[in-house]
Each structure stands twice: as structure tokens, then as C-alpha cells.
Image: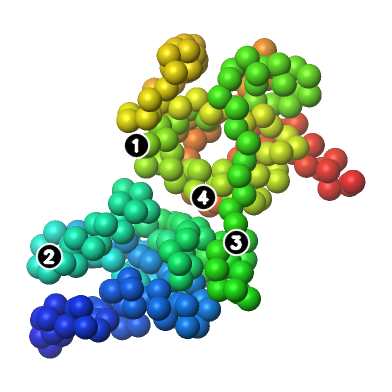
């Protein structure tokens, strides 16, 4: 019966939504249409159903559980599969790859929350902790980034980054703030993109960083052209601090001394900020002072 259902799905794909999993659509256009009508977000899972071990763990530990199925009633579910053994119509394969390229999805599983216009609200991958923890994080993303009244994503915050080492040092000396130096590959590094999407571009991080750190971007793109002066500066700092992998995030004082070293961490802004405070306790004290005010 499963093979027959999949065959029918392939034949009717352009006419109506079909799915190998109950409750999941496979046609993005239909998912966006339903989301608009209901004023709810779309949860998109990019998965490799017949080869990706982490996708299977996400299915077993989260997506098949009652907690998630209850949450699923509040969203439209869209499955975009990238199988290796299971035959897939060329139209479906091309469409799924187009969506993966559009949202810069490079690892599986990736779970996106988007509105009916396709604007991204937030993203996750596989995370330990089970369905309760996972759904709680999805709800937190929606609370932060989705306007239920309009059915649209809220405007994303824009953190202010400098690319000048000299400016960052001067500001650090004047303000006493810590320099947060992000060694990144903005146009090719998947984990760098996830760090920005899941942490640096969130309201919680932007509000925290504004009062506590100076954001310094040290980029190493593969396609984007950079001024020679900027490229030289970044390469010198990479050599100075022995940076070998991306993303690497250094917390520095005004003299350039390393106070802490981090990178991509799962768990969103709360987990990342908690780790930063553990590395540099002064950042925790700053938060305490702000809370008293």
C-alpha cells in the first residue's frame, strides 16, 4: 500500500498535496496557501529520510511524539525530502533543491519556521532533550519572531557590527566593553550561518550585546570580494590568534587578550549567552546591574 500511495503521489503531485507522512504536505505552494488562510506559520523539515541518521533520531524522539503532534495543530507541516535510495520525481527533486538553496540549507535535518510569504522566523536542527524541550524551543522562536495577528514574521533585529579592528579596540578602551570577534565565512560556512540565524540575529542576543560587547566581524568569504586592507587585517588577526576553524568567536579585552573562546552552540541565544557569561563572568555582572535598573 505504501508503494501505491507514493506512486499516486508522484502522479498527482502538481495537482494536489501528497505526503508519505500523515499530516505533512510536500508541496510548498499548498503549505503557504494554507498558512495564509489560517494565519499560522509553516514548519518546514529538510530531511534525508532514507539515509540521514540524525533525521531519523529527530523523527523518533520528537516528530512522532504526542507533544509535537499537539503543537503541529498550530502550524502547517511541510516535508522537503532529499532521499538517496528512494526514487523521487524530477520535479520534486528540483523544487526541494531550490528551496534548500533559497534558505541556505546545507545540513540535515534543518527545521525552519516561516510565514506564508516565506519569510524566515527561526530555525533548528536535531537537538537532544526530547519532544518537550524541542517544542518549547519552537514556541520560543514563534513568540519572538511571529505576529499571530497578522500571520507574518516580525521584522528581524539588526545587530551593529564593525569590521575595523582599530575601531573595536578604541571603543573597547573608551567604554570598557568586551570585544566579541566573530571569525566567520559568511557566504560558505554552514555553521557560521546557523550561528547568525539562531543566535546573533535574535532579539534576545541583540538586546544583550548592545549593552555589553562590541561586535567585530572578521569575515573570510569565498565569493564575496573584500578590500585588500580588510582582507589583510583579517588574515593577520587569524594568524595572531591561531584560528583554524569557522566559526570561532573570541571574547577579547581592549588589549586584545583572549578572555574566552566559543563558536556555534545548539540551544539558541539563551544557551550561547549563558556560555559567554561563564567564560567572562563580568558579562554576568553587567546583566545583573541592568536588571536592577
In the rendered view, would you say 246 is above or below 190?
Answer: above
Q: State the residue lying farthest toward the bottom.
A: 1
Mark earlier in primary sequence (2, 3): 2
| Image location of residue 166, percent across then percent down | 63, 14
Image check: 170 left or right of 120? Answer: right
Cα separation between marks 4 and 3: 15 Å
- Pick whichever, 219 or 15, lies toward us: 15
Cα separation between marks 1 and 4: 17 Å
| Residue 26 makes an appearance in the image | yes
Residue at x 19% of width, y 78% of height: 13
Mark 1 highlights which residue? 188
Cα separation between marks 4 and 2: 32 Å
Mark 4 highlights which residue? 198
Mark 2 highlights which residue? 90
**Secondary structure type for disc 3:** loop
- Pick whichever, 13 or 212, lies toward us: 13
Disc 4, disc 3: CB below 8 Å? Answer: no
Amino acid at each position: 500500500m505504501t508503494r501505491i500511495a507514493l506512486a499516486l503521489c508522484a502522479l498527482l503531485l502538481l495537482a494536489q498535496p501528497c505526503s508519505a507522512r500523515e499530516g505533512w504536505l510536500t508541496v510548498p505552494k499548498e503549505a503557504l496557501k494554507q498558512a495564509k488562510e489560517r494565519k499560522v506559520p509553516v514548519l518546514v523539515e529538510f530531511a534525508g529520510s532514507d539515509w540521514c541518521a540524525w533525521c531519523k533520531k529527530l523523527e523518533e524522539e520528537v516528530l512522532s511524539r504526542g507533544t509535537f503532534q499537539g503543537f503541529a495543530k498550530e502550524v502547517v507541516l511541510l516535508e522537503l525530502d532529499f532521499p538517496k535510495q528512494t526514487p523521487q520525481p524530477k520535479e520534486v527533486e528540483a523544487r526541494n533543491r531550490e528551496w534548500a538553496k533559497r534558505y541556505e540549507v546545507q545540513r540535515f535535518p534543518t527545521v525552519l519556521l516561516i510565514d506564508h510569504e516565506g519569510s524566515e522566523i527561526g530555525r533548528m536542527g536535531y537537538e537532544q532533550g526530547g519532544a518537550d524541550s524541542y517544542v518549547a524551543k519552537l514556541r520560543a522562536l514563534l513568540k519572538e519572531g511571529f505576529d499571530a495577528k497578522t500571520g507574518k514574521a516580525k521584522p528581524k533585529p539588526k545587530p551593529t557590527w564593525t569590521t575595523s579592528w582599530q575601531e573595536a579596540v578604541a571603543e573597547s578602551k573608551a567604554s570598557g566593553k568586551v570585544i566579541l570577534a566573530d571569525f566567520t565565512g559568511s557566504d560558505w560556512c554552514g555553521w557560521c550561518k546557523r550561528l547568525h540565524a539562531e543566535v546573533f540575529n535574535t532579539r534576545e542576543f541583540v538586546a544583550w550585546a548592545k549593552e555589553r560587547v562590541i561586535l567585530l566581524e572578521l569575515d573570510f568569504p569565498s565569493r564575496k570580494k573584500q578590500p585588500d586592507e580588510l582582507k589583510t587585517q583579517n588574515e593577520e588577526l587569524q594568524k595572531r590568534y591561531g584560528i583554524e576553524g569557522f566559526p570561532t568567536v573570541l571574547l577579547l579585552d581592549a588589549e586584545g587578550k583572549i578572555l574566552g573562546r566559543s563558536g556555534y552552540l545548539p540551544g539558541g541565544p539563551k544557551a550561547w549567552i549563558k556560555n559567554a557569561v561563564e567564560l567572562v563572568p563580568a558579562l554576568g555582572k553587567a546583566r545583573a546591574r541592568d536588571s536592577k535598573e
